[in-house]
């Protein structure tokens, strides 16, 4: 029997943390005002979603040495994870019920470009640890999203998978990994040439049933 999996992106696909973590990041950055006067705007934080920490560091603190900027943003990430585990953020409508419905038929996985602790904070706050079979992220492997999709599929003996994301880079990662792609139209970004899409998270069951 074939093992089919749905692999999820995080930001713009399952939740939106930008408003929740913005003050957390700016509070940490304020501690280092002698090195940088940087304070992040909401639009900037939106643009960082889906990027690796090194990419964010080069964009947000270009005046600092990359090693130092990574140290500061690493503290931002650790602080945000503690906050999110305790307080949560904005999850998309019907997310939890839809995930539990999908779990009845599919292996559920998460692949994100985030740092260690971010996915775990989401799972712990919303009591979803038992819903997802495995997770992988750039902060642990140092690999690209496409490489991590292939890695998690191999580790879980997945025969066929679909990646759900909200950006062109998500589409490109799915293509690299050889999976189908579902574009989350409600998310942060845009994509081209995709075959499947959802307007709401709750549309997933009907779309995935047509793929597998």
Image (tube, rainbow, N blue to C red):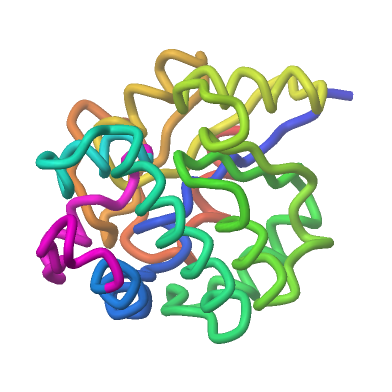
Q: Is residue 27 above or below residue 33?
A: below
> Which residue reaches farthest front?
34
Q: Say if the magenta span includes residue 108.
A: no
| Main SS class of the magenta portion in the image | loop
Q: Residue at x 73, y 67 (%)?
A: 128
* Residue 187, image x, y percentages: 28, 58
Q: Nearer the viewer, residue 128 or 158?
A: 128
Q: Nearer the viewer, residue 108 or 81?
A: 81
* Residue 82, image x, y percentages: 58, 73
Give the quarter of the image for residue 195.
top left
Question: Taking 104 as reference, is 151 left or right?
Answer: left
* Residue 113, image x, y percentages: 45, 39
Q: Residue at x 79, y 46 (%)?
A: 133
Question: Taking 72 as reference, is 63 left or right?
Answer: left
Across the whole image, how many numbered discs are drawn on residues? 0
- Magenta segment boundaries in residue numbering: 31-52
Q: Residue at x 23, y 56 (%)?
A: 188
């Amino acid at each position: 029997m074939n093992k089919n999996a749905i692999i999820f992106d995080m930001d713009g696909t399952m939740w939106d943390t930008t408003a929740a973590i913005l003050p957390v990041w700016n509070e940490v950055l304020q501690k280092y005002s002698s090195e940088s006067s940087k304070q992040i705007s909401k639009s900037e934080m939106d643009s960082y979603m889906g990027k690796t920490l090194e990419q964010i560091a080069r964009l947000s603190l270009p005046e600092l040495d990359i090693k130092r900027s990574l140290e500061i943003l690493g503290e931002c990430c650790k602080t945000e994870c503690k906050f999110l585990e305790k307080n949560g953020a904005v999850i998309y409508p019907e997310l939890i019920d839809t995930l539990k419905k999908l779990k009845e038929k599919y292996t559920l996985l998460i692949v994100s470009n985030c740092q260690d602790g971010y996915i775990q904070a989401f799972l712990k706050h919303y009591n979803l640890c038992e819903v997802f079979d495995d997770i992988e992220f750039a902060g642990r492997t140092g690999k690209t999203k496409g490489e991590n999709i292939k890695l998690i599929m191999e580790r879980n003996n997945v025969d066929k998978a679909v990646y759900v994301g909200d950006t062109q880079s998500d589409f490109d990662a799915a293509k690299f990994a050889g999976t189908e792609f579902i574009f989350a139209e409600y998310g942060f970004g845009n994509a081209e040439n995709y075959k499947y899409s959802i307007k709401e998270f709750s549309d997933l069951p009907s779309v995935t049933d047509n793929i597998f």
